[in-house]
Image: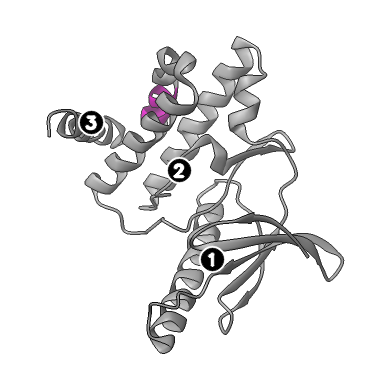
Amino acid sequence: MDIIQRGAEAEIRRGTWLGRDVVVKSRVPKSYRLPELDRSLRNARTRNEARLIHEAREAGVPTPIIYDIDTVNAEMTMEFINGPRVKDELGASTPEHIGTLLREMGRSIAYLHRRGIVHGDLTTSNMIMSKGRMWFIDFSLGSRSASVEEMGVDIHLLKEAFQSAHPELLDRFPLILEAYRENYERGDEIIRKAREIGHRGRYT
C-alpha cells in the first residue's frame, strides 16, 4: 500500500482490500508512553473513531464504510472516497454552486449535532465531494454525547478554518449557519455559544 499522508498521530495508506479501493489509517506508536498504555490508547481511539464514523452515517451524513478494524495494530480499513476536497471545490466553483456547498455543509453539521456528535476538526480539508454528495472524514478528534460548549467549539473552529483557508468567502459563512439552524432545533443556542467562544479568544 502507498502512504498518502503521514502525521504525528496517524499514517494513511491507500491500496486494495478484498478487491475494494480502500484507505488504511494506522495510529502511530508513541515511544514516550509505556507500551501497554500506548496500545490501549491507540486501540481505544481507533474504536472510538470507527464508532463515530458509523454513527455519523446513521445520522444521515455521508462517511466512509468501515470494512475492518485491527485492534492489535490500531488500524482501520475503510472505503476510499474518490473526489476533490471541499477546500478545492470551493476555490473552483461558481457563486451559485458555492452557496449550495455551504448550505449542504451546514445541514450535515446539524445532523451530527442532533445526534450529539461533534467532529472536532471541522475544516474543508476533512470534507470530500464525491457522487454529488459531501462526505465527512477524519473523526479522530470527535466525540459523542456532546455538550452545548463542545458543539459551539465545532462551529467556532469551522469559522476559524474559513478565516484561514477561505477569507474571500467569510461574507457567505452565514449560509452555513442558516442551514444549520433550519436543521437543528437548538441551532440558535449553539451559534450563540460559538460567538461567545470567539469573544473569549479575542479578549484573553
User: Picture coordinates of residue 194 (x, y %)?
Assistant: 26, 34
**Which secondary structure, mark 2?**
helix
User: Disc 1 versus disc 3: distance between alpha carbons?
Assistant: 30 Å
Residue 50: image quadrant is bottom right
Query: Chief secondary structure of the magenta span?
Result: helix
In the image as oriented, which residue stretches furthest toward the front?
32
10 Å crowding of disc 1: few (<14), some (14-19), many (20+): many
**25 within the magenta span:** no
Q: Amino acid at mark 1?
A: Ala
What residue sits right under mark 2 in the picture?
111
Nearer the viewer's eye, disc 2 or disc 3? Answer: 3
In the image as oriented, which residue stretches furthest toward the right?
19
User: Picture coordinates of residue 41 (x, y %)?
Assistant: 41, 76
Residue 109: image quadrant is top left
Kindly check if marks 1 and 3 are in contact, taking CB atoms under 8 A apart as contact: no
What residue sits right under mark 3 in the picture?
198
Among numbered discs 2 and 1, the one appearing first in the sequence: 1
**Which secondary structure, mark 3?**
helix
In this orientation, which residue lies closer to the viewer: 165 or 122?
Answer: 165
User: Picture coordinates of residue 83 (x, y %)?
Assistant: 73, 39
Magenta region, residue range? 176-182
What residue sits right under mark 1 in the picture?
50
Q: Is 150 on the left or on the right of 140, as rendered? A: left
**179 within the magenta span:** yes
10 Å crowding of disc 2: few (<14), some (14-19), many (20+): many
Looking at the rendered image, the quarter that the N terminus falls into is bottom right
Q: Amino acid at mark 2?
A: Tyr
Q: Is 165 on the left or on the right of 85, as rendered? A: left
**Which secondary structure, mark 1?**
helix
